[in-house]
Image (cartoon, grey):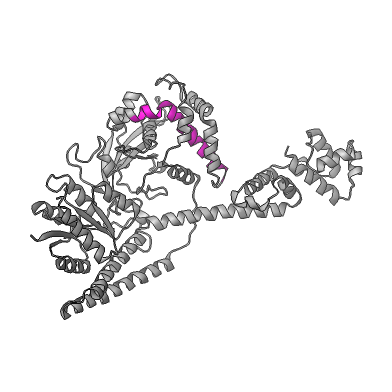
Amino acid sequence: MARSIIGARIRERRRSIGVTQSELAHRIGISPSYLNLIESNKRGVGEKLVGRLARELGVRVEDLDGAAERRLLDQLRDVAADPRLSGLGVEDEQAGEVVGRFPGWARAIATLARSERELAAMVRAMSDRLKHDPFLGEAVHRMLTHTAALRSASEILTDVPDLEPAQRERFEAILATESRRLSDVGGALAAYFDRSNTTRVAATPADEIDAVFEANANRFAAIEAAVAGDSPSPAPGATTEDDLVTEAEARAGGAIEAVLDAAADLAGEPARARLRARLVRYAADAIALPDAAFASAARSAGYDLDVIAARLGQPHDRVCRRLTSLAPAPGRPRFGYLATNAAGVVTECFTIPGLAPPRHGEACPLWVNCRAAVTPGRTLRQRALFPTGLGFVFVARARQVGAPGFGSPTVHVTDLLAMDEHDATLTVYAPGRHGDTPAEPVGTSCRICPRDGCLHRVGEMRAGG
Amino acid sequence: MTRSVLLAEDEPHIVESLEFLLGRAGFSVTVVSDGEAAVARAMADTPDVLVLDVMLPGINGFEVLRRLRAEAGTARLPVVMLTAKGQREDRETARRWGADVFIAKPFSNAELVETVSRLAASGTS
């Protein structure tokens, strides 16, 4: 039992019914000094004694040590552990006292802390939106273009002394026109922010975990080091996935906990548990496909997904994940990876700079993973051109998941490997290597896609487009 | 001998200023306003320097650069990438595709003319 709660609750209840410490101690058959230690949270209380105490105090056992209080206590301890509060002298050890004696205040603190985390998540989401919103991107582009025309013309007017009158007049006209255009962009931006709603965009646990991987460029050197010991990697098929996970936890448990500790701003236990599971799988992947040997095998195969998977006897998704975690090196491409379920929802995301995957629905159906999903087992390539002007090469293949067998439902997950166009030239997927590869215009999500006349648009682009 | 600049830019007022400035600096300037035309012109009559905007109609500046770098005749053509998108990713993309210099708008006239002159004088084309 959480004695740091129960002691305070006993004392609070005893005082509220006007019973002295000695009197209560006498009634339940212990010494007053022992009861004092219990009430001061210096001694634990066994189940039988809690029962006697609850009876004498006229409350239920759960009222003395309820699950809700334990959760509240955990939340207060999370608050106390916040590094931003480290200089304030928060009495961590008194958290139980606060929960027991002042539950209202405890709930208030926990609520504020939760609200603060949600606001931080909202700021991150808004920041993401500012970065990827096509209207804002276009407005900034226009603003810089008009400013460039203004600056160039005004520098000519001030720096060139021998301008002919007609030239002077011409550049002054440019100033007038470009100033007006710049004002128009400013007005459009102001109107956009006026219209722009402030709907809360909550980050999901999956988003948070993807963000941790993104912040680490999809590679955890400490986990790589932890699994890279003397133990050989199991031969393909010689071990089960469960064995691999057990081995991963044994070898990399400490390194995984260190990553979890560093990700202190995860919003809650679900995110933490998910991150832990992803890191354990990362370690399992690293055991199955050790870093240096895998990097060498991948390079010699021209980073051909099917060839690597066949040569190393590993599933495609594992090969994709290991490709995302390769250490940066000259001449080595960087890979992103997405997994989508049969409904087209991105279930896992290892991104690379410039690639904004559609995490929250209305995903662009023109990505090659949508085609691969209906031709399981076939590897398809796409040269994808985004409205931002950035180009990527996508390689997608759908695989069956779940137990095989007649009568079992067939469910597929589609793996999509992504690389920017330049990096693709270092692989077998280089555009032009297997005949002409025309670039296909794609978007991220219909909600923010500026492409006109797309037959596949679902609903209208958000205001401002 | 007059040195030549191919200017691939679709904003008429920026074109007007750059044509004036580069002409005044002694360059003969040819202007194209879309990506396909930039590739065709650079291959047909390779200039001393290409000033290339990223956001062009049709194929964008990165694609123009990619195609030029793939051809022996333009593989080493000095290229100044000009863009209103000063983002890190764009710089990185331009660098990877082999742009010699990346200048973000709004640029300084003096810097641009000095850069073009330097690349033309280096004679690496």
* Relative to A293, residue A53 above or below: below
The answer to which image quadrant residue A416 occupies is top left
Tell me if I can see residue A424 in this picture.
yes
- Principal SS element in the magenta part? helix
The answer to which image quadrant residue A36 occupies is top right
The residue closer to the viewer here, A191 or B32, is B32
- Residue A190, how many percent across, how many down? 40, 69
* Relative to A153, residue A64 above or below: above
Which residue corresponds to the image point at 36% horizontal and 26% vertical from the top-left?
A293
Q: Quadrant of the N terminus of chain A?
A: top right
Residue A422 forms part of the magenta stretch: no
The residue closer to the viewer here, A230 or A232, is A230
- Residue A311, how many percent across, how many down? 32, 24
Residue A275 forms part of the magenta stretch: yes
The residue closer to the viewer here, A334 or A185, is A334
- Residue A427, how many percent across, how many down? 26, 36
Give left or right: position of B95 versus A193. Answer: left
Q: Which residues are magenta?
A: A268-295
* Relative to A361, residue B107 above or below: below
Query: Extreme bottom residue here?
Result: A165
